[in-house]
Image (cartoon, coloured by chain):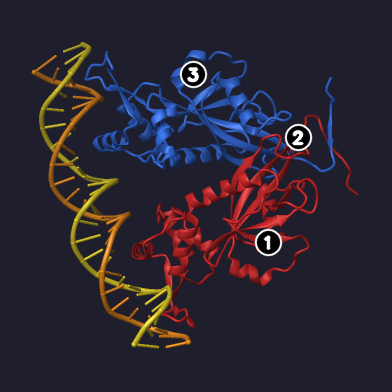
Chain colours: A blue, B red, C orange, D yellow
DNA sequence: ACAAAAGTGTTCTGTCTACACCCATGC
DNA sequence: GCATGGGTGTAGACAGAACACTTTTGT
């Protein structure tokens, strides 16, 4: 049996790891939110997260939360920022190490269903009121994603293993919130030499079907080590 | 009188804020380090930092540490990363929210002298062995600085209010570790329109003295709000 | 045959790079 | 007058932006 209280000479804030989980579906960027079942902010939507366990790193905690909510593992995850102001949480001083993850919604669909808690995907421009300072954290994550997608090939983490160039372009347009010229976009992407042509096309659409490609991650990592810079 | 112990139902890691303090002097990028007077790592050099006080934000804590070590206030400071792995500190689970600060060494020189603890500036390429995982934190900070100086006008935070273009170029060369063409560098800087000519030159040197400039921070902030992007 | 989206090249413009000579100052 | 570093312009290469027509497919 474990002792029921932990005592320290100096006060310590509580520490949580929260994770903004982004997905991309039907041309729309989405985030996974959890409806809180307990106070404070009962009934509000919140970013998934929880308190660090004993001797658990924040990243391990965030990955655990992600797995519990989505069943997904081995996805792209990166530390975002730590929010440490007293007053963020009415229960006392709680500091949050925030992460963001990019998941392939196509893979997620298969595994969902363990919903003891109420979880839902919200389009990024149709968010409900959020608990705590989670709107601030989410804006932080959006800005990071917008900045990073331009010089790191992280967009592919949001698409299925096989995707089309129109898909990829729609993803960039949704995240950057700009229209991109089709010809210039394709040229830039092709110049990187990091797409593998799958020699297959979309079928069953009433127009020419787009070609499938996949991202050559191994090649990218080789090049990255030699100072190559992905830029869109 | 305050109670002598704090008890919580669940275990909590201890939280510190540490701050890498960068300075620039004589063409060299430097960091301020503290020689530890107590175990663990007694006698090793370490990044200044300390435990969060009750209801203190990590940023406030880092600023307090900075002021205690250097006497400087209102300097550029930014959150770097949080280090949360158990095992970082032999005393138990300690998570560190790391910051980095850029200080004008010219102003610092005036105020130094409150050295109860042993503090010293080390050139970035002549570092001693560091305590804990502080070498990792420092490399993190160097990479951030290198990345950020290219698209944010933070270099000016390391120079005196009045500086010359050769000074500025030396700063960029020291941080980016590349040689830059003098003419191209000057053109780029001038194109930003953010330097104010002080109509004065260096004197007392056995060659033509370089002109003094200052950085127009107010103008930059105006432009930044309208989407202007500083790029070198 | 037509509707709907995929695919493809060229021109123009502006920016980055490379490069060499004169200028001011103190000794 | 000479040694030292400060200051300046130009030509060629390259990359980004703008732009319109043809191709494929299902109905």
Residue found at x 37% / y 62%: B185
How far apart are the alpha carbons under marks 2 and 1?
A: 33 Å
Q: Which mark is residue A108?
A: 3
The answer to which image quadrant residue B200 occupies is bottom left
Q: Disc 2: which chain?
A: B
- Dots 3 and 1: beta carbons under 8 Å? no
The residue under the point 33% across, 28% down is A195
- Image coords of residue A10 (percent x, y): 82, 43
Instruction: Read off the residue under disc 2.
Output: B12
Neighbours of disc 3 within 10 Å: few (<14), some (14-19), many (20+): few
Query: Which dot marks residue A166?
Result: none
Q: Position of residue A201 (x, y in %)?
A: 27, 18
Q: Is residue B76 visible?
A: no
Kindly state the secondary structure of the residue where label 1 is placed: strand
Identify the residue under disc 1. Answer: B120
Counting every numbered tag in the picture gives 3
Disc 1 is attached to a residue of which chain? B
Q: Disc 2 versus disc 3: distance between alpha carbons?
A: 33 Å
Determine the secondary structure under disc 3: helix
From where the camera sits, is residue B179 visible? yes
């Amino acid at each position: 049996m474990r002792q029921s209280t932990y005592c320290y000479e100096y006060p310590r804030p509580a520490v949580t790891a929260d994770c903004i989980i982004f997905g991309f579906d039907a041309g729309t960027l989405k985030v996974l939110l959890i409806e809180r079942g307990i106070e404070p902010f009962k009934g509000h939507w919140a970013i998934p997260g929880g308190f660090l366990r004993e001797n658990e790193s924040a990243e391990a905690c965030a990955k655990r939360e992600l797995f519990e909510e989505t069943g997904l593992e081995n996805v792209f995850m990166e530390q975002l920022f730590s929010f440490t102001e007293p007053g963020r949480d009415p229960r006392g001083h709680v500091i949050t190490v925030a992460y963001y993850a990019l998941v392939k919604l196509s893979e997620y669909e298969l595994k969902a269903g363990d919903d003891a808690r109420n979880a839902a995907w919200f389009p990024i421009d149709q968010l409900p009121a959020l608990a705590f300072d989670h709107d601030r954290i989410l804006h932080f994550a959006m800005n990071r994603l917008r900045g990073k997608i331009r010089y790191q090939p992280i967009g592919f983490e949001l698409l299925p293993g096989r995707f089309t160039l129109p898909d990829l372009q729609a993803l960039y347009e949704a995240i950057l919130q700009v229209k991109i010229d089709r010809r210039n976009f394709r040229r830039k992407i092709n110049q990187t030499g990091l797409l593998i042509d799958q020699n297959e096309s979309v079928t069953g659409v009433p127009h020419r079907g787009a070609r499938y490609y996949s991202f050559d991650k191994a090649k990218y990592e080789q090049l990255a080590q030699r100072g190559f810079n992905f830029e869109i």
